Image (tube, helix red, strand yellow):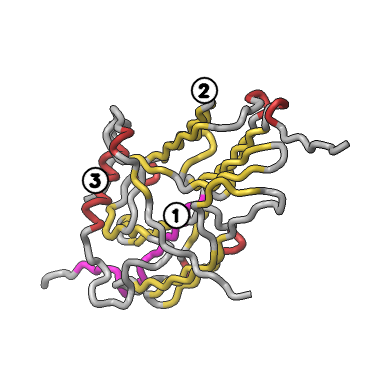
């Protein structure tokens, strides 16, 4: 289901419902990628291309390293949670550290055309399918 | 130094005791609160919320932070696999220290909102000299 956003009040709710449905899916199937590693990701399809989105609050852009090869995407980086020495903590819920996650998609990616955007703590990777993976129309003689 | 791996926390959905009239999911942002000599500092993780969509209020000693995500970024895409959901963030804290409300400042960087609440003069700690 492609999300079409018309009514501004229903929008977020429809996004949430669509994501809830996608949460039951075992899309990676028999591939090595699975749930449970940091960072959690959402995968979208935009036309024929894939989009991977991950929330990485507190990660600096320069501490993020993205690699793509074949059908594999690696998201590697470091999240720092820092305070001045004089501070005394009332509450500590944020967790920092290193992360390294590899995802294997069910299609080859055109690594040269991958673009990444990091804004407001959200990483968006646009992953175009490789030319060999694109469907071709077949003419019937 | 040994490196620590980030533990997977999952997002904390708002408890039903804080029911709202608006439909949909709301999340409680992971927050650190710490105190320095002259201020209380609140750091909240609000990924996907733009600067203009953050609302910070201090009323009767209760600090409330609301952050709205922009659903437009999910236009024309089809979710095929999902490990987390998106929703607006909201969280309130009752402050136990008197705050100089005119001097509150806030900044946001990489999805982390930092609110600095300077203590009111009468709440500042005083070092007592022993005569």
Determine whether the residue tagged by mark 3 lies in a helix, strand or loop.
helix
Q: Which numbered mark, 2 or 1, is in the foreground of this view? A: 2
Q: Crowding at label 1, few (<14), some or many (≥20) Cα neighbours within 10 Å?
A: many
Q: Crowding at label 2, few (<14), some or many (≥20) Cα neighbours within 10 Å?
A: few
The residue lying at 52 percent from left, 33 percent from top is B52
> Which residue range is magenta in the image?
A121-137
The residue lying at 40 percent from left, 77 percent from top is A70
Residue marked by disc 3: A17
The residue lying at 31 percent from left, 71 percent from top is A34
Determine whether the residue tagged by mark 2 lies in a helix, strand or loop.
strand
Identify the residue at the far right of this view.
Answer: B131
Q: Crowding at label 3, few (<14), some or many (≥20) Cα neighbours within 10 Å?
A: some
The residue lying at 34 percent from left, 41 percent from top is B14
Residue marked by disc 1: A55
Does A106 appear above or below A21? below
Res. A138 image quadrant: bottom left
Q: Chain of mark 1?
A: A
Labels 2 and 3 within one chain: no
Residue A13: give its label: none
Labels 1 and 3 within one chain: yes
Q: Chain of mark 2?
A: B
User: How far across and down, in percent of the image, does residue A66 sit?
Assistant: 51, 68
Res. B18 image quadrant: top left
Residue marked by disc 2: B59
User: How far across and down, in percent of the image, does residue A6 sit?
Assistant: 28, 34
Q: Chain of mark 3?
A: A
User: How far across and down, in percent of the image, does residue A114 sit?
Assistant: 46, 65
């Amino acid at each position: 289901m492609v999300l079409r956003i018309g009514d501004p009040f229903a929008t977020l709710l429809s996004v949430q419902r669509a994501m809830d449905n996608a949460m039951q899916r075992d899309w990676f199937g028999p591939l090595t990628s699975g749930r449970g590693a940091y960072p959690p990701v959402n995968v979208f399809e935009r036309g024929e291309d894939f989009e991977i989105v991950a929330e990485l609050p507190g990660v600096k852009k320069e501490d993020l390293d993205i690699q793509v090869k074949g059908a594999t995407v690696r998201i590697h980086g470091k999240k720092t949670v820092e305070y001045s020495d004089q501070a005394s903590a009332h509450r500590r819920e944020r967790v920092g550290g290193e992360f390294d996650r590899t995802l294997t998609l069910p299609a080859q990616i055109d690594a040269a055309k991958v673009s990444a955007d990091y804004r407001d703590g959200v990483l968006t990777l646009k992953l175009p399918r490789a030319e060999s993976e694109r469907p071709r129309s077949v003419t019937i003689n | 130094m040994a490196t620590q791996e980030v533990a997977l926390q999952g997002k904390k959905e708002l408890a039903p005791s804080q029911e709202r009239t608006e439909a949909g999911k709301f999340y409680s942002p992971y927050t650190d609160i710490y105190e320095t000599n002259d201020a209380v500092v609140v750091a909240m993780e609000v990924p996907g919320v733009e600067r203009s969509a953050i609302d910070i209020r201090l009323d009767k000693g209760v600090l409330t932070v609301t952050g709205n995500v922009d659903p437009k970024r999910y236009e024309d895409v089809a979710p095929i696999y999902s490990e987390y959901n998106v929703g607006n963030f909201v969280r309130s804290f009752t402050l136990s220290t008197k705050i100089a409300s005119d001097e509150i400042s806030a900044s946001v960087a990489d999805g982390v909102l930092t609110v600095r609440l300077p203590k009111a003069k009468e709440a500042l700690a005083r070092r007592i000299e022993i005569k």
